[in-house]
Image: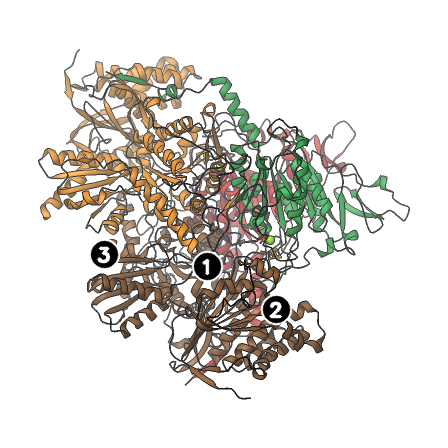
Chain colours: A green, B red, C orange, D brown
Amino acid sequence: MSTQATVTGSNGPTELKLSKRDFESDQEVRWCPGCGDYSILAQVQRTLPKLNNPKENYVFVSGIGCSSRFPYYMDTYGFHTIHGRAPAIATGVKITNPELSVWVATGDGDALSIGGNHFIHLLRKNLDINLILFNNRIYGLTKGQYSPTSEVGKVTKSTPFGSIDHPFNPVSMAVGAGATFIARAMDRDPAHLQTVIQKAHDHKGTSFVEVFQNCNIFNDGAWAKYTDKQSKPDNVVYLEHGKPLVFGPNREKGIRLDGFKPVVVSLTNGTYSEDDLLIHDEAQPNSTYAYIMSHMMDDPELPVPVGVFRSVEKVCYEDALMGQVEAAKKRFGKPDLQALLESGDTWEVK
Amino acid sequence: MSTQATVTGSNGPTELKLSKRDFESDQEVRWCPGCGDYSILAQVQRTLPKLNNPKENYVFVSGIGCSSRFPYYMDTYGFHTIHGRAPAIATGVKITNPELSVWVATGDGDALSIGGNHFIHLLRKNLDINLILFNNRIYGLTKGQYSPTSEVGKVTKSTPFGSIDHPFNPVSMAVGAGATFIARAMDRDPAHLQTVIQKAHDHKGTSFVEVFQNCNIFNDGAWAKYTDKQSKPDNVVYLEHGKPLVFGPNREKGIRLDGFKPVVVSLTNGTYSEDDLLIHDEAQPNSTYAYIMSHMMDDPELPVPVGVFRSVEKVCYEDALMGQVEAAKKRFGKPDLQALLESGDTWEVK
Amino acid sequence: MSKPVESLPEVTIRFAGDSGDGMQLVGGELANTSALSGNDIGVFPDYPAEIRAPMGTLPGVSGYQLHFSSFDIHTPGEQYDALIAMNPAALKMNIENLKANGILIANSDAFKDRNLQLAHYDENPLENGSLDKYQLFSVNMTELTSKALEELSLSSKVVDRCKNFFALGMVFWLYNRTMDHAVGLIKAKFSKRPELVDANLLALKGGYSYCEMTEQFATSYEVKPAKLPPGKYRNLTGNTAVALGAIAAGQKSGLPLFLGSYPITPASDILHELSKYKHFDVRTFQAEDEIAAMCSTIGAAYSGALAFTTTSGPGVALKGEAIGLAITTELPMVVCNVQRGGPSTGLPTKTEQADLMQAFYGRNGEAPMPIIAASRPSDCFETIYEAFRLAIKYMTPVMFLSDGYIANGAEPWMVPKVDNLAEIPVAFAKDPESYAPFLRDEKTLARPWAVPGTPGLEHRIGGLEKQADTGNVSSDPRNHEYMTRMRAEKVANIANELPATKIDGADSGDVLVVGWGSTAGAIETAVEHQQARGKSVSRIHIRYLNPLPNDLGKILGNFKHVLVPEMNSGQFVNLLRAKYLVPAIAFGKVQGLPFYSSELEAKIDEILESK
Amino acid sequence: MSKPVESLPEVTIRFAGDSGDGMQLVGGELANTSALSGNDIGVFPDYPAEIRAPMGTLPGVSGYQLHFSSFDIHTPGEQYDALIAMNPAALKMNIENLKANGILIANSDAFKDRNLQLAHYDENPLENGSLDKYQLFSVNMTELTSKALEELSLSSKVVDRCKNFFALGMVFWLYNRTMDHAVGLIKAKFSKRPELVDANLLALKGGYSYCEMTEQFATSYEVKPAKLPPGKYRNLTGNTAVALGAIAAGQKSGLPLFLGSYPITPASDILHELSKYKHFDVRTFQAEDEIAAMCSTIGAAYSGALAFTTTSGPGVALKGEAIGLAITTELPMVVCNVQRGGPSTGLPTKTEQADLMQAFYGRNGEAPMPIIAASRPSDCFETIYEAFRLAIKYMTPVMFLSDGYIANGAEPWMVPKVDNLAEIPVAFAKDPESYAPFLRDEKTLARPWAVPGTPGLEHRIGGLEKQADTGNVSSDPRNHEYMTRMRAEKVANIANELPATKIDGADSGDVLVVGWGSTAGAIETAVEHQQARGKSVSRIHIRYLNPLPNDLGKILGNFKHVLVPEMNSGQFVNLLRAKYLVPAIAFGKVQGLPFYSSELEAKIDEILESK
Ligand SMILES: Cc1ncc(C[n+]2csc(CCOP(=O)(O)OP(=O)(O)O)c2C)c(N)n1
Ligand SMILES: Cc1ncc(C[n+]2csc(CCOP(=O)(O)OP(=O)(O)O)c2C)c(N)n1
Ligand code: SF4
Ligand code: SF4
Ligand SMILES: [Mg+2]
Ligand SMILES: [Mg+2]
């Protein structure tokens, strides 16, 4: 969402001078101590003041889940709706008032289980809405059942013998559904999370951000491999537009593309240098590229990418719709209700 | 579905001697004259007798739509359910009786609009169910509104100024959702359609078959480019496992992969021969390959692939579930209801 | 050869043929011409669930019934004066309701072997004397049409498609109708294929001339114009009326009209109609399913649109959970249910009133909402408009009920003056000082409508129980009881502004017939007949089903018997019995068909005799 | 130092603390120990919607109430004899219901600045004399626990977690309970972390010794065993009872049990419980949403499983459309609704009975289904079992209603003998000669159950209206009416096999209290009290809500007043009024809380006085 024209009053945008505080509501935050949701909330509250949008233009819509309590804690407009339906409600909001900056806060159950259909249809229609998926690979609010992102074999309340569903790869799904902006971040990397939130905001079209979020009560350590200091460097690669894919504790490893398969190469044995690596291109028009990046997560040999996978332009639904409204107004002139009611074959009775 | 053990009685499978007739119910077929659905019905009825499965083991489940009338015309078990929910109902059928050969007949609205969530979750869970998508890029039964596969700009009853939604690419969606078998066929190529149906049946796991189907009443010619004699050779490439991708009226063109991008090359100017072309590998474990193939449809420069995009093995949901049931039986022994009721802390009142 | 013209007060005529035979088109055209000639009309299109059921079969028959008259009528008629049967199946399905000695025009060319078989006729009924009690006119229409079109040298398929206009031409002659409007229709409809313009014009005129020239009919008939109140009129189906009413509410309220909808028979036409009027700031959104349709509507209401969603019974079932959210967040919107035959997929193209209880109770928890039903095609305009007015005034979703019968049915509508429409004032909250999300208006109990984008009014709402005034999440027991009561009282209070219930007939007596929704016409006719016969029978019609009018209990108490006809197994009747403890009598019809006034008359007779 | 022991007939005690304080665990353990000692018990766990609401806050308070007695009781009690308050918020939220002079044990260590603030106390209530009307025992539990655990040198966080067992130890001493079972629980629960076993055992014993050694309590109490009918007993929550009842029905019918479900509070525990019993051929399927849960259940029923789906109100709303399909295809299955506070998301962890009308009408069209409700935790077993029996006998989906109160509540259950359970005979159709999909059994009107895989019975069913007998699609008007009537009659006929309604008290008199569902216990207590006071008050409890028992109308007619208490705004009462035209009086409580018998007694008094 890149409309900055929404600033009202005579002061220029830079005059808004909002701070994190301005985005904190008076409601007590009710997540478990230690929950990753706190960080996501804080990063959003830190990022929004930088965007030069007045508070009243933000709307946060959520479904049901721990994560979906999010809007209560933001001092903006907020709507805590029903399970899985936030994208559909946000769609109505955005169509009615395209000037608003509309955000969806959702969980892996909310967005991918009950809400899967609205999720893919939102991505397809490409309304300018920013969706943040709090992925903790578990149902938090209902106290610990497995979710569509839980790994096979997971023992939970509803799967005492281990779960048997193959999980979704949310990023692959989003690519398959035609998303124009896809990113991933982690609750435990606040600075990077802020950058990603800002980029999601700046993108015009639906922005999908998956956040690795820790549920320390029901699924503690689900992402530890990627967030713990020790294991992270070997297991995470940061995607930066125009930069090669380098990772490792000493940036000693890189990713090359062998045909359509990413492979890890060493940068220390003299065979390859950074120049030989895959250069990340988030603007690559061919979505196959984003698919390849998304699929790295499924290969235990490869590090998991975080950052912006894809960011391309495509007509937004609400723009096309308002375009049709404007065109119709031009073509048919000022609406005349009386004339409309009297249109078609009419006759007078005297 | 590859269980042939389902044949009952003492006669071997080859003794079933079923014919197309055996699969025709006594109900009058009620599609518009000229509808592509007729061909799909006929090809299914022609293929089933070859599969050595007795009639009573087939179940056809459908949602709502013209295409969803399908089960009425099959002399097998059939269930015409509610809009979009056939995959979920079929799931209950298959879990209850994994021996059955379960088929879903569905439309582009049924499967991808209202039923999108069940569709992707079926693919994810990988039950051994065969789903045939009758894609006519329109809502037939409700008399002509655009569907999630309709092209942008389409003028329909509900879009008098042209539709503004970006369509889904069903095959890309299926890849993104983790499908293990994906294929495409056309109502107008009966022989090929039969092969694909047979392969879908033979695959163990969810088989997704998209069929280009013509609705001659509300969207006539939607696929003409791919089905008309004249234009077809230039616009369709048949995928055959282990064979190069060749097409053109005189098989004079081929597809090569340039990195992850398919490109058309000429086989007549001496630069390339068939040996240089991409060799189709439906068993390629890396789903990126199937994604690349699926994405060809979105590039007007490329021919559209038909045939089997992907066919890989992955544990079926019902097998894993029955495996847990069997393991539990082994571990806990013969179920003893009285003992179960009396388990936990009990006390006697005298 | 000028033949005698007989004047009739009213005529009911039914066209019947294959779904591909174009019966709806020519039936509709006769309706238009009749309305334009000043008749009152009532129509009943009746078609199969299939797009094109197999030719010649019984389920493939499509019918269009028209009632036109020189006085005020309320229904599309019952038994027909004339039946046009384009094939044996059409005859079979419809002959039962042709009046004795009624006119039967059959396309004899279609009464051939396979067609007879498909209609399960052992013999050709046109030839075996079985139709002797009717005035049978066997006309070889296919052949005659083909002759009329000879000069155009068109394919036989195309020629065959024109025989409906040949039939229409015959009917035009029979009822002394002018062909002007039909000629215009043909020219407009086929403007892109001039050869079809010529063909259909020739067919139409061919049918007309055929009657003019032959000895087929001894008499022709005319139906004089009805004495309708003066004004400008047009013909209107219920679905179009809903669309126009919604646009009018949008214009009068000054809000953009948002429609979130998913296609479903018989409601889709409202979506189709509204999507044409983008220049009236109508924003139609074809959602991925009914849940998304409902939810997008909630989102639109939340951010200040005039929010609307349309569907039929199964769609309402899907919307139930979200309707609960709309109720508890107290946002204004209208949910339109064009009811069809149920349960489940049921009879999608047939009519029924079996979703009333669903309107009341089709969601979890205590979740009351106003419910309002239209009585006839043209009444849909006023009723949907009223639904929007109430929604905004009381900050609540409102359920609007129509059904397949009035949605597809048509009648003349006196176009209202826009200035005379009730105002729909909208007052968005603006003032941060006085604002709290659930602070209620003292009179209406409505909460304020504060739309995103308004500085200083940032607030949060949701589906969890809310503290009074602040709207913060609260699980306080007393607060929950209070809020539950407030939500109920707000809806109940609407009764205080409802007009006095109009009693048709004496305000006490033997039988009171209580109707709601589309049974209005049949009940009105039946009660008029009973009153003409001197019986002590009155009727009331209930537009507001929730809340019920304040004077209802008193009225019911003044009659010995209360009869409640409904196209269901008895739903509204139970509300009356529970609320007023009156022994109201249920009279249900669950056939996918509207009531015939004769059925109601018979039932009233039965009650009158029983006493 | 042996102190006096006073004998009491019954005790109500409430543990209250932060959601992290482990109140549910120790409360439940006291319940188990009490039951094992032969008391009758009733429990009421009451926790916040949040997983872990912020520490020390009012909404974060979690409570567990236990009623144990030496006689037959029906509720978890009302006002408590003793309250254990682990922090100021817990005190604030619960003190209102502590009896005058009741025992109040407070963890004084937690009554510090920030905690007092969070609970909105200006002063420390333990110190300002505001609690003088209670027997206040300020105990520095945190410190004492930490002392008791000194030798283990654990982190202070771990030590702090053990204070709930310290409190339990105190209560054990106070009510003369044996610690054996609690010791076993601690050993089992923490078996993987031996240091926690030691810690919690020390805390438990520390609390006990503290009372033994100090002068805190002058007396201790005992509650003698209740005289329950002889047999083997266990403690059971309603949700566990449902799971066991379903497994029993599976075993007795010989069918695999299929559960299609989507987690939702307060129903999820049934899914959790059933997923453990795969060796009983239980196949649990956690679906992507409630619609898929319902649809998979339909698919399972179609192919011959004992089909089951569990949810709460919002889930039923989503299932409505598919339930309609189940009804029209006449497939056997049970839909379980563990009701919670509504509307919309409402009060997810609180109880309510506001989904009764949804059970009747929450779908499009005329779609009746049997509805049956459990009255108390242990009754869930028998009632769900009966639901399955009816489903299969009549080939119909059955709605089973429970609610948060009995789902989480527990009581002693006399384990039945499996051989004494009613049979659930299953007769799949096998014979192609006599088979037609909708040919009905003459007596039950049930259609045959022919499962895929059966040779020769290939057939098609669906949601469109079906021709009688053949099941082929039919839009014939008369057939639709006939099938609608058949579906209704089949359900209505069940009334003929229902047992005579048991009247508690005289079969005529001043007041009849009619209850359904979980209000049974409170009503029973209130009516017993009224009868003990010599009042002419009787009660009946309705398990079968649809169809209603045949003798109900007659019974209602024999009382001057009929009172219908419900945890809603008056739903069942309207059914009685509509059907029997009796002026039954609604008495609703919509607070997310069960009735107190005192509230009912007061209401009965009011009615008795009014006459
Ligand atoms: C219609 C409906 N079904 C089920 C529920 C119960 N429910 C609430 S949240 C939730 C899933 C939460 O998981 P997720 O979306 O991953 O969010 P988290 O709590 O993990 O942040 C479920 C099943 C509900 N509230 N409404
Ligand atoms: C709950 C519900 N919503 C809407 C409908 C109306 N409806 C029936 S079929 C259909 C779409 C049909 O399109 P598609 O699935 O593409 O099937 P086709 O008719 O083109 O074969 C719709 C919207 C319905 N029957 N049920
Ligand atoms: S349960 Fe998990 S996701 Fe929910 S608030 Fe607690 S830690 Fe966070
Ligand atoms: S409307 Fe289209 S899809 Fe439906 S039966 Fe006719 S031709 Fe086929
Ligand atoms: Mg989660
Ligand atoms: Mg289609």
Q: Is residue D236 left or right of residue D539?
A: right
Q: Alpha carbon of mark 3 to alpha carbon of mark 1: how far?
A: 30 Å
Give the letter of the chain under mark 3: D
Quadrant of the image occupied by residue D584: bottom left
In the rendered image, which residue does mark 1 sit on? D350
Q: Is residue A117 above or below residue D216?
A: above
The type of residue carrying mark 1 is Lys
In the rendered image, which residue does mark 3 sit on? D583
Sort mark 1 into few (<14), some (14-19) or many (20+) by Cα contacts within 10 Å.
many
| Residue B286, disc | none
Q: Earlier in the sequence, mark 2 or mark 1?
A: 2
Q: Is residue D187 above or below residue C550?
A: below
Tag in front: 2 or 1: 2
Evaluate whether label 2 is on the same chain as label 3. Answer: yes
Quadrant of the image occupied by residue C155: top left
Report the residue at 49% width, 17% height from top: A331
